[in-house]
Structure formats: C-alpha cells, structure tokens
Image (spheres, rainbow, N blue to C red):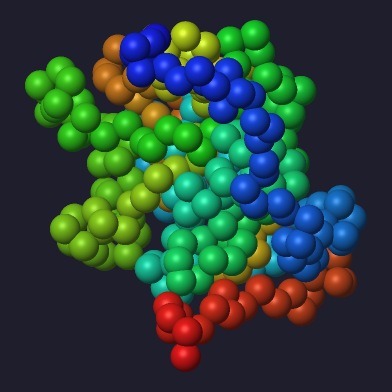
C-alpha cells in the first residue's frame, strides 16, 4: 500500500481527490483511413507465408503495407512479446507509451499500434481478436497489454543475480541482428517496449504493482493485424510460457507461436497507401 503521511493531509484532501477525471487524448479525430473496408477485406484472405517462433526464442518477419498477419497459439498456452518497425527505416518503431495513452492499457479489435516520434503514425491496426471475450476480470486483469516492458537480462541480474539469455529482450536482439545482419550492439538500441500478446496482466488493487496471471489463450486463438505501412516484425515466445508462475526462466513450460501472413483479394486494397508521417514541422518554437 502506498504510504500516506496523514500529518501532511490538508483539510480539503477529499475535495482534491474527488475532482472528476478528464480523458487526456480524445480519439474521435484520429485518422480513419481504410477502416471501413477492413471487415470486408478480411473475408477474402489468402495465406502467403508463415514463420514459426520456437519456445524461448524470437523470429522476425516482414509484412507489406495493405497485408494482414496473425499471431496464432499452437500446441499450448503461450504469450509473446511483439516489436514492430517500419521496414525501410528502423528508427520508426512501435511506441507502446503513446499507444497506451491513446487506446488504454490493453488492446483489442480496432486499436492501432502507433510509431515513435517524430513519425507518429499508425503502424498496424488490430482487426480480429479471439480473446476479446475476456474483458476485465475481478483482479483488474486483461489481455494484450502495453504496460509491461519485456523481460530482460538486466532486471534478472538486478533481482536474482543471474545471467539469463533467453528473455524476450535478448531474444529480440538476436532475431533482429540475424534478420538484418546487424551487430548486437547496433540491434539492441532498436529493440523497444512491446505489445504483450496473449499475456494477462494488470495492477494489483492494494499496492498497484504490475501483475501477471495464467493467460486464457488456447491453441487456435489468434490476434490479427492489418499492416498500415511496410512492417518488420519481431516476436519472442516468452520464457514465461503462459506466465502463470515463472516470468523468465527455463522452468516454465513453453510452446511455439505461429505468425501467418495473408494478402486480401479486396480490390479497394490494391492501391493502399500508408498515412504520411506526422506533419509537425519539428521547429519546437514559434517562428
């Protein structure tokens, strides 16, 4: 429980706490390019490729703009950590913090994954979620979060004094370095905060600490995306398995994840054009 020093409590403390909240970023004015045709487009999907991500490892995959991809549970309950980059410029990457500010702590159908500054445009849109039935449980948990960062060797070293190399951060570094022929030192700064696919998380009611619990995902469940620009994706099959017990170790039972790539035969997508990067002039002062 957060410490409260009642000696400092003012007479109007309850009134200060009781002011109504204001949504920071109303989303009514977000661009809606292509949204109206996606439900139709996904009815004519043709699978063109797939990438299998082994347990406790990561793999990269590429998705052209206007195509779809799915992350699919196979063999057993397993969560994954997803990175996305603009395929032709790795400096433009998924911005979990701004996505969270726009859409909330957990994502589902209709939400978009936004890119980092100074680009600030949608990289992908979630078009189907077989776990959308889960909603919010009594613990305050839900699935597909953008609040956790990714399991990493630095926190493992800090908390347990171990060198563990199959956490999602290291997995994504190896996958990106291999896919783009980069040194680890170049690849590591490009790896970023993730969408925790299938992971069930929240904040505890008492201490407000980040928690995880057994994922509700089962073989056959999937999360589907529409690529709003040319994408390079990186997916790690987390060493936590379904995250019911161990967060990052060789103890948890882990399974592969499957990435499936699709094109649509919808004519309206034939000439799909991504949104341009942010039009802000980057002067950062009045001129």
Q: Is residue 265 above or below residue 27?
A: below
Q: Position of residue 184 (x, y in %)?
A: 19, 55
Looking at the rendered structure, the number of numbered marks drawn on it comes to 0
Q: Position of residue 168 (x, y in %)?
A: 33, 36
Q: Nearer the viewer, residue 5 or 280?
A: 5
Residue drawn at x 46%, y 62% is: 116
Q: Is residue 266 above or below residue 259?
A: below
Residue drawn at x 56%, y 57% is: 114
Q: Residue furthest bottom?
A: 287
Quadrant in the rendering for residue 107 = top right
Is residue 275 visible in the rendered image? The answer is yes
Q: Is residue 91 above or below residue 287?
A: above
Q: Is residue 258 left or right of residue 128?
A: left
Q: Is residue 70 left or right of residue 178?
A: right
Q: Is residue 130 left or right of residue 208?
A: right
Q: Position of residue 220 (x, y in %)?
A: 67, 27
Residue drawn at x 59%, y 53% is: 113
Q: Position of residue 282 (x, y in %)?
A: 45, 80
Q: Quadrant of the N terminus?
A: top left
Quadrant in the rendering for residue 270 = bottom right
Is residue 68 visible in the rendered image? The answer is no
Residue drawn at x 26%, y 57% is: 189
Q: Is residue 116 above or below residue 193?
A: below
């Amino acid at each position: 429980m957060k410490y409260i020093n009642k000696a400092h409590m003012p007479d109007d403390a309850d009134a200060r706490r009781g002011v109504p909240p204001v949504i920071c970023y109303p989303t009514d004015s977000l661009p809606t390019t292509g949204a109206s045709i996606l439900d139709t487009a996904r009815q004519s999907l043709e699978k063109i490729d797939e990438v299998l991500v082994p347990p406790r490892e990561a793999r990269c995959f590429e998705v052209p703009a206007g195509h779809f991809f799915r992350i699919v549970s196979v063999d057993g309950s397993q969560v994954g950590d997803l990175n996305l980059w603009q395929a032709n410029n790795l400096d433009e990457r998924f911005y979990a913090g701004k996505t969270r500010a726009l859409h909330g702590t957990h994502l589902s159908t209709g939400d978009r994954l936004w890119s980092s500054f100074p680009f600030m445009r949608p990289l992908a849109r979630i078009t189907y979620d077989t776990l959308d039935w889960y909603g919010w449980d009594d613990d305050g948990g839900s699935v597909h979060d953008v609040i956790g960062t990714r399991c990493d060797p630095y926190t493992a070293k800090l908390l347990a004094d171990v060198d563990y190399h199959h956490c999602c951060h290291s997995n994504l570094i190896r996958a990106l370095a291999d896919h783009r022929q980069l040194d680890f030192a170049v690849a590591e700064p490009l790896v970023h905060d993730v969408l925790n696919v299938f992971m069930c998380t929240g904040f505890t009611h008492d201490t407000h600490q980040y928690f995880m619990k057994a994922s509700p995902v089962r073989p056959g469940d999937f999360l589907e995306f529409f690529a709003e620009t040319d994408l390079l994706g990186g997916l790690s099959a987390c060493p936590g398995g379904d995250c019911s017990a161990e967060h990052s170790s060789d103890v948890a039972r882990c399974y592969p994840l499957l990435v499936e790539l699709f094109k649509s035969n919808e004519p309206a997508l034939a000439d799909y054009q991504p949104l341009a990067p942010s039009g802000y002039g980057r002067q950062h002062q009045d001129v």
